[in-house]
Image: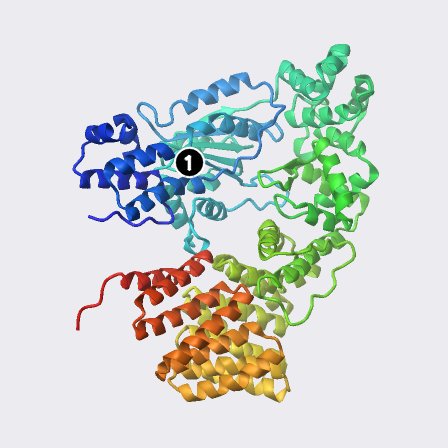
Amino acid sequence: MTVPELGVGMDKAEFGRLLRAARQRSLLTLESLAEASGVSVRAISNMERGQSLPRQATLSELMDALELDEQERRRFVEASMRRTERAPRQLPPDLATFRGRTEALAAVHRITSHVAGHGAHVVISAIGGMAGVGKTALAVHWAHQEADRFPDGQLYVNLRGFEDSGRPLSPGDALAGFLEALGVPSSSVPRGLEERSALFRERTASRRLIVVLDNARDEEQVRPLLPASTGCLTIITSRSQLSGLAVTEGATLVGLDVWTREEALAALAARIGEERCRAEPRAAAELVELCGFLPLAVAIVGAQVSASPQLPLGPVVRELRDSRPRLDALSSGDRRVDVRAVFSWSYRALTPGTARFFRFLALHPGPSVSAEAAASLAGIGMAEARRHLRELISANLLSRDAEGRYVLHDLVRAYGAELVEEERDDRLGAQTRLLDYLRHNARLANRLLGRAESEPPEPPADGVVRITFDTREGALDWFRQEESTVAAALRSLDDPRLLWFRVNTQDWVSYYSVTGRWTEEIETKRIGLEAALLLDEPTAVARNSASLARALAETGRTEEADQQVELLLGLLHRLGPVERAATERSIGWVRGRQKRHAEALHHARRALEIYRAEGDDGAAAREMNAVGWYLALLGRYEETIALCEEAVPLLRRHRNVRIEAAARDTMGYARQRLGDLDAAMADYRESLRLYGEGFDGYNQAEVLDHLATAQQERGDRAGARESWLRAADLLSAINSPRAARMRANAQALDTPPNPA
């Protein structure tokens, strides 16, 4: 009996199965393995039942006692580490100034004691209360206190149920984020909500996790996100009561009211100092009363008072008492509860530059913002932006998430957006700068991903931050940092004057292609195509439709790809020569991916004819390789070699390294079919070298696949196996489904050939 292969989703349960299989194969009981290893029976039993993983010393003792060979030991070590490496840690930081909530904490800790205890059942707690009452603070504090009891990590999502945009996060999008955090590749995330929810329950079935669903809109938004494991604790916060969850899901409802007077005073003292509260006890008491004992309001006032240590509390109280009007969403007949007054007082305490910066920050479309994007919104430099950010954090108008990005509370953002209208700030100018920041820097970043455009990027608008990229990883980090902003901008910035951004996202599509983010690429291009059709711009329609068709073909969605090809064919007569050639080229690529090689050749030849007629030697040389490839796939190998040999000098002259690499691969493919293995493998290796210069792992994998077949044909099974494994690793890195085929080819060579 062999030890099963590890998968990407390896967890404690699978390590337990490995351990049990090895013990049974060795004919050992729990007791005899415990005696041989020195590990207790209880510890071994817990491991086999998927409740724990061994420490390094314990693992070594178990492997020695089981007398595992080198391969089995490697698998045990990999299994014991995989879950630790993949355990999500998404909780925002706990507040150092958290105070009070004694009764609420006692209640929630009683809830936690039921997780996987005697008579274990699914544990769900919904914390409800008004905006700013501290629901998120309590949930995060509780989760941090209990984190050690849930070793498989914590998942957190802001469901954005109550935001001015009126666009709560869909359960499907939230599940996609959770599944990726649990190790599911983006390309493997199902499209449907029910399928995503089922996969989420499957992935959490044997885990002990904390799941925090923050700022939920209603029960329907939450239900698909609930794990079914008795080892999970789910904490939900919402301004709604979510009583339906108590009826149908057995959730425990925790109602959170404003602080008591004592709790609010303790929280104020934690921020401004006990001495100031003791020096003016009546003013301190009235101050928290004017804040309505609302935690958010007390925090903001406390931060501002703390910033002015010489200011008595009396003037602060008088200003708050006389300030009007209130935030409409929190209007009340009780004059003491005036959150807008608190926000206004905090806002007026800002320096003029920071006040302006705060207003522009409120226009950011996403849930969190990077410092660079914030600076671009305001049209200022990074040093100045960081000063404003520090001032806003100290005023508690801004916080930071687990990734270090800046977060405006939804009420604070609403207040800032109102101020933009009151001050008649240039909303369109700020939004244009943000989109220009995303467009310009994506173009620069792509130069390090081997996807640079032939022409340099247009200069950005004044005030847009330009990122300096030194490494490929730095470029990828920037893309990852801003992808949530791009997604939010595509969905929410619907001013007709900003539609240009939706139809010009090719640089972001290139990032999605490099990283195998096919789902995001398809969604982005659908939005771009819709905008292009709305604008009725044929060139924009062609570019977006062609990119969408290629992504659909790559993911095997043939019928949808065909729909885009039909759209492109009907558009050809409206395009100029250059765009018509590019469109023919894209159609040929799609048909080639669909193995409709004769059609692919037809469209590639039409593109080549146009490029030649236009006198564009560089584009013509690129297309000559495409024509040569389709000729090779049709068995016309001599024509392929002649055409590619003609193209290579032109490609070198135009410094098109990537297509020169493709031409070398094409020639190798043709020469291999003609039986010239030495020349074929030389071409393949030169192609690999050239693709390596451009960090093009996707196409390197394609060439390695071809090289492996030549090595196998020559009888070099070990070389072929190594090439296919390298291809599998490269494709796995970009979540390509073809990685499995490469790995299967390599594994097939593990079996010795039958003797002749």
Residue 596 image offset from top left, x and y in percent: 40, 78
Left or right? Give the position of 268 relative to 200.
right
Q: Which residue is mark 1?
A: 152
SS type, badge 1:
loop
Q: How many marks?
A: 1
Residue name at image x 44 percent, y 81 percent: 630
Residue name at image x 31 percent, y 40 percent: 15
Residue 671 image offset from top left, x and y in percent: 40, 82
Residue 445 lies in what quarter of the image? bottom right
Q: In this orientation, does residue 588 appear?
A: no
Q: Up-down: is 65 above or below 377?
A: above
Q: In this orientation, does residue 366 appear?
A: yes
Q: Up-down: is 639 above or below 167?
A: below
Left or right? Give the position of 20 relative to 560.
left
Residue 417 image offset from top left, x and y in percent: 72, 43
Q: What kind of residue is marked 1?
A: Asp
